[in-house]
Image (tube, helix red, strand yellow):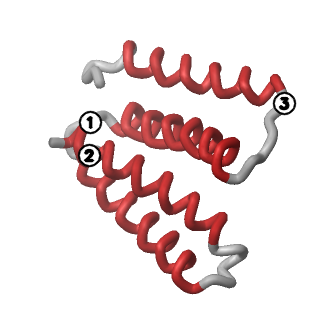
């Protein structure tokens, strides 16, 4: 169940970050509320997941998968560009997530 909580936490964080962009500096009330609510739910779900999953692994997965997903959403939905070095960073984050998972006593 902890892995489900972590998946929900990641999804909520990604949705909240996307809503944060759409809030336009907190000038759109509904997107602002979605962002704040999404972050709150993400932290609640993360707190449930770390009861079982080691903190370092859970946080690395939460932050890393969220970062890569938001990067891709930014490229697709918001038409932002990315230099090749940014793609190197995405690959390095992904490799880091894999290594952390392999080195953990609890595997994803």
| Residue neighbourhood size for the residue with mark 2, other residues' Cα within 10 Å, grouped as few (<14), some (14–19), many (≥20) | many
Q: Residue 42 appears at what percent x and percent y?
A: 39, 58
Q: CA distance from mark 2 to mark 3?
A: 35 Å
State the SS at label 3. Answer: loop
Above or below, 16 against 75 in this view is below
Residue 67 in the figure: left or right of residue 88: left
Quadrant of residue 32 within the rendered picture: bottom right
Q: Which mark is residue 13?
A: none
Above or below, 50 against 31 in this view is above
Residue 84 in the figure: left or right of residue 108: right
Q: Residue 17 appears at what percent x and percent y?
A: 56, 59
Please name which of the two marks, 2 or 3, marks the residue nearer to the observer: 3
Q: Residue 10 appears at what percent x and percent y?
A: 41, 47
Residue pictured at 34% horizontal, 20% vertical = 104
Q: CA distance from mark 1 to mark 3?
A: 35 Å
Q: Residue 101 appears at what percent x and percent y?
A: 38, 20
State the SS at label 1. Answer: loop
State the SS at label 2. Answer: helix
From the image, tell me which residue sits under label 3: 83
Q: CA distance from mark 2 to mark 1?
A: 6 Å
59 or 73, which lies in front? Answer: 73
From the image, tell me which residue sits under label 2: 49
Sequence-first tag of 2 and 3: 2
- CB-based contact (under 8 Å), mark 2 and mark 1: yes
Residue pictured at 46% horizontal, 64% vertical = 39
Assign the N terminus to one quadrant of the image.
top left
Sequence-first tag of 1 and 3: 1
Above or below, 103 against 5 in this view is above
From the image, tell me which residue sits under label 1: 53
Quadrant of residue 6 within the rendered picture: top left
| Residue neighbourhood size for the residue with mark 3, other residues' Cα within 10 Å, grouped as few (<14), some (14–19), many (≥20) | few
């Amino acid at each position: 169940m902890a892995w489900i909580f972590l998946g929900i936490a990641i999804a909520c964080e990604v949705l909240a970050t996307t809503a944060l962009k759409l809030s336009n500096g907190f000038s759109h009330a509904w997107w602002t509320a979605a962002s704040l609510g999404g972050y709150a739910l993400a932290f609640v779900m993360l707190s449930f997941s770390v009861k079982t999953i080691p903190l370092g692994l859970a946080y690395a997965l939460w932050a890393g998968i969220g970062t890569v997903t938001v990067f891709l959403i930014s490229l697709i939905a918001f038409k932002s560009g990315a230099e090749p070095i940014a793609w190197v960073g995405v690959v390095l984050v992904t490799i880091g997530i894999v290594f952390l998972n392999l080195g953990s006593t609890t595997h994803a």
